[in-house]
Image: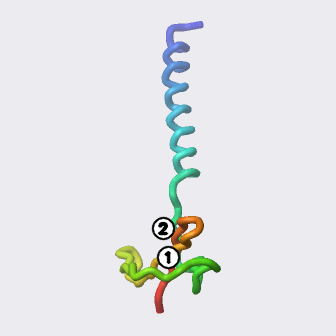
Amino acid sequence: MNAVTPFLLFYGAWFIGIIVLFLLGYMIYDKRYKNNGANTPAKPSNGFLSTPEVFIDPKDGFTYRVYYNPRSGDREYIREK
């Protein structure tokens, strides 16, 4: 065992740990707003009520209305025509 081996083991473990954390973060990252518009539903799911909240998404320029499910607390963002 030469003097380089502990160096490679230590920094190799750090490098692998950082890569694993990066991959986990990418998989778990909140992707609610990461759609291309193709999978945006045209109408809200059952049980969702319209709210007065409307906003213009700065990324695509479309207007979205927020729908709220009072039973679960979930929100849906539906593009208005």
* Residue 56 location, quadrant: bottom left
- The percent coordinates of residue 15 (x first, y second) are 51, 31
Vertical order, 73 against 22 (above or below) = below
Judged from this view, the residue extending furthest toward the front is: 71
Foreground residue among 37 and 51: 51
- Left or right: 77 as drawn, with respect to 72: left
Marks 2/1 in contact by CB < 8 Å: the verdict is yes
**Image label count:** 2
Q: Mark 2 is on which residue type?
A: Tyr
Numbered tag placed on residue 33 in the rendering: 2
Q: Residue at x 54, y 25 (%)?
A: 13
Whichever of callouts 2 and 1 sits on the residue coming sooner in the sequence is 2
Q: Amino acid at mark 1?
A: Tyr
Please state if 1 lies on the left or on the right of 75 as rendered: right
Residue 54: x and y, percent?
Answer: 39, 81
If the image is split into quadrants, where does the N terminus sit? top right
Up-down relation of residue 53 to residue 71 (above or below): below
| Image x and y of residue 61, in percent | 38, 82
**On the image, numbered disc 1 is attached to which residue?**
77
Q: What is the secondary structure assignment of the residue under circle 2?
A: loop
Identify the residue at horizontal 50%, vertical 8% (top origin). 3
Q: Nearer the viewer, residue 18 or 6?
A: 18
Regarding mark 1 in the picture, which secondary structure is present there? strand
Q: Residue furthest right?
A: 46
Residue shown at 49% from the left, 82% from the top: 50
At a point 57% along the width and 78% down the height, the residue shown is 48
Q: Residues within 10 Å of mark 1 (few under 14, many from 20)?
A: many
